[in-house]
Image: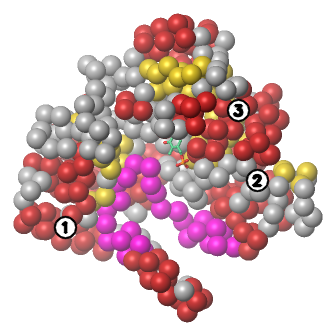
Amino acid sequence: MVHLESADPLVHRAVLGETSRQHGQLEMIASENFVSPAVREAMGTVLTHKYAEGLPGKRYYGGCEYADQVEDLARTRATKLFGADHANVQPHSGAQANMAAYFAFLDPGDTIVGMNLSHGGHLTHGSPVNFSGRLFRVAAYGVRESDGRIDFDVVRETVLRERPRLIVTGASAYPRAIDFETFGEIAREAGAIHLVDLAHLAGLVAGGHHPSPFAHADVVTTTTHKTLRGPRGGMAMCRAEHAKIIDRMVFPFIQGGPLMHVIAAKAVALGEALAPSFRDYAGCIVENARVLARTVTERGVQLVSGGTDTHLILVDLRDRDLTGKDAEQALERAGITVNKNTVPGETRSPFVTSGLRIGTPALTTRGMGADEMTLIGGWIADILDRPGDAQRIESIGRRVRELCETFPLFR
Ligand SMILES: *Cc1c(COP(=O)(O)O)cnc(C)c1O
């Protein structure tokens, strides 16, 4: 970063600070990951200079020869990786991909059915503070109190009662495999569009460690930066019959020019996900989460649904005199980064909460495996047992830093 250092020392210093924070802490936020140096390089290329409104071969600007090549690589790799008919790789984020998908099928005032935010859904699935909750009539389903799993009786009942035009499935904080096939059947029964939001699960599906939703969905949106391990961004994929309307909703309806440098990085990341080693990576993510779940439950930590099938666990702190907020801060003091999260049946505010979401994608990228998960799970349990014990937190913090040195992040 020789240019940045001399041109803008303040920004440079902040970037260096972030670099050492990422290296020196255990990143366990379930939605985060570390991209490869090649993906990072692609994001810093001259493609950021290029206006390329439109699609490959059909642009509104001249000079798009190489932009076309890059976007075609990304689109082709996405459809191959997921077995989709069509992919639009332009959405700037997961939220944008969802917006495009909604507008492809809905008018303001239409009814959608989505997962309750406090049960693991996402803001864009109908929350009143999001455009989705403002523009559409929303009915929500959730998980059963008894076992923390999606209650398909409630889903079916809600859908048949509300007769939504669209059902959105997928979640941000649900530790179990999602039965997209049953959701697809219910949607078909009700004559509704099935939108699968694969943001958290995309890498696991790509790597063959979560059942694919593609045969059961009309449209599939995703982020590219979570388990898929690409640059920050989104994608929308669909069957051929919906390709035109999805493309038109991304541009010109909700977005302007695509971020070509990010699309180049998406192409690189999708290429990486097509390599056989990505299967192993996805498998390790899930295995690491299982080991972590087993380790903490053996120490008496309660988990929503009792465990995990995916890349994350959801700790339920309601049996303890400890909030999600305080637990998050105690772990952060030891260098373990997680996020507080609502749990099903939550009674506290979203700024306090009674849960923690803990994920393994980033540490798995760093090369950590079962031994490290056992170690880290033990530390997490130690801290949750005595969150106010400064000496204990300090000594765990030292061991965290040692572990980070053993698994260098930036080589
Ligand atoms: C992360 C996430 C999104 C939004 O992604 P952004 O890129 O942050 O807009 C949408 N849906 C689900 C289920 C997510 O987990």
The location of residue 383, given as percent across then percent down, is: 14, 54
For image coordinates 12% across by 68% down, the residue present is 395
| Dot 2 crowding, Cα within 10 Å, few <14, some 14–19, many 20+ | some
Badge 2 or badge 3: first in the primary sequence: 3
**Residue 361 seen in the figure:** yes
Q: Is mark 1 within 8 Å of ligand 1?
A: no
Against 250, is 45 above or below?
Answer: below
Looking at this view, is 66 or 321 the one in front? 321
Q: Is residue 43 magenta?
A: yes
Q: Quadrant of residue 254?
A: top right
Q: CA distance from mark 2 to mark 3?
A: 16 Å
Can you tell me whether the CB of the residue at mark 2 lies under 8 Å from the nearest atom of ligand 1?
no
Image quarter of the N terminus: bottom right
Of the residues tagged 1 and 3, which is closer to the observer? 3
Give me the residue at 67% from left, 48% from top. Answer: 91
Amino acid beneath label 2:
Gly
The residue identified by callout 2 is 256
Q: Real-space Cα distance between discs 2 and 1?
A: 45 Å
Kind of residue sitting beneath label 3: Phe
Labels 1 and 3 touching (C-beta < 8 A):
no
Answer with left or right where residue 382 lies relative to residue 58. Answer: left
Secondary structure under tag 1 reads helix
The label shown at residue 397 is 1
Q: Position of residue 378 (x, y in %)?
A: 17, 52
Amino acid of disc 1: Gly
The residue tagged 3 is 103
Q: Earlier in the sequence, mark 1 or mark 3?
A: 3
Expressed as whole percent of the image width and height from the top left, the position of residue 167 reads 58, 22
Region of the chain picked out in magenta, as a range: 18-45
**Helix, strand or loop at mark 3:** helix
The answer to whether 133 is drawn above or below residue 312 in the figure is: above
